[in-house]
Amino acid sequence: MSLPTGPLPPEYEAWTFPGGGAVARRDVAPAVRSALAASGSLYAWAAARPEREAFAGRGAAYGVSLGGVGAVVRHARRGGYVIAPLLGDRFVGRPRFFRELAWSRYLSGAGVATPAFLAGVWTRSGVVHRADVATERVSGRDLAAFFFEGAAPSDAERTAALRAVGALVRRLHDARVVHPDLQLRNVLVGGTPLGAWLLDIDSCRGGGTRSRGRNLRRFFRSWEKWNRTAGPRLTAADRRVFESAYAEAAA
């Protein structure tokens, strides 16, 4: 299975400006244009908003209102212990947020919840570019925060969260897709009833049965790492809840 490609979806528009360009959902495009005119970059605009809410991660991200839509704006940065220190926020080729847009639409069509893509902006310097991305804000906490930060969730909350995440990951795999960085920070849980969303999807790729096994092992390595570093809050019984929900959600 390969990532679908083609023209920009009709609900999005694209434009260029000296040194870069942007793509945005039509309902937020005027706000993106205004932000660029005011601050030069979408990320700088979000960082300067007095009402912003900051989120920790691979560099700060900001929760803001973008044209009346709740959004999270982040500056694209490389991951990995080798590449990140060398290249930081510099990329070559087509901006990765085009992959994020395509995966967002594909996964949503397959029943895999992920925050909607709102906008991406890139600026070029020679052969490299830097980029900012805005996605629709979803109210909730990632799994690491849910289980390991603050008071532990109740038995009912932890069961609901793990069942939602197990079903989410099974739908991802039934769509023949894997998330190479499937870990606790990249799954968000929240809402009533409790639901789950997949984050950081621009690295997704197609994968079959063997790939899904490796993907699950990656997820449980993250699980055990958090238990080692922050205290054993995720138990063998929790894993059975996740695995049961994963099995029951078979397409």
Image (cartoon, rainbow, N blue to C red):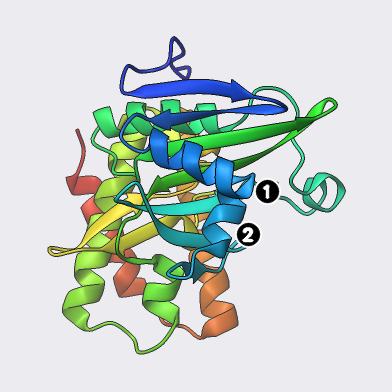
In the displayed orientation, state which residue is furthest to the top. Answer: 6
Q: Position of residue 26 (x, y in %)?
A: 34, 29
Please count the marks in the image.
2
Q: Which mark is residue 77?
A: 1
Q: Which mark is residue 26?
A: none
| Residue density around tag 1, few if under 14, some if 14–19, many if 20 or more, within 10 Å | some
Q: Secondary structure at mark 2?
A: loop
Q: Position of residue 107 (x, y in %)?
A: 33, 32
Q: Are marks 2 and 1 in contact (CB under 8 Å)?
A: yes
Q: CA distance from mark 2 to mark 1?
A: 7 Å
Q: Residue at x 44, y 54 (%)?
A: 72
Q: Position of residue 167 (x, y in %)?
A: 24, 49
Quadrant housing the C terminus = top left
Q: Residue at x 47, y 55 (%)?
A: 186
Observer-nearest of 195 and 33: 33
Q: Secondary structure at mark 1?
A: loop
Q: Sequence order check: which comes first, mark 2 or mark 1?
A: 2
Establish if 123 lies above or below 216: above
* Residue type, numbered disc 2: Arg
In the displayed orientation, state which residue is furthest to the left. Answer: 193
Q: Residue at x 29, y 39 (%)?
A: 112
Residue 196 visible in the snapshot: yes
Q: Position of residue 59 (x, y in %)?
A: 64, 61
Residue 234 visible in the snapshot: no
Q: Which mark is residue 58?
A: 2
Q: Residue at x 41, y 45 (%)?
A: 135
Establish if 145 lies above or below 184: below
* Residue type, numbered disc 1: Arg
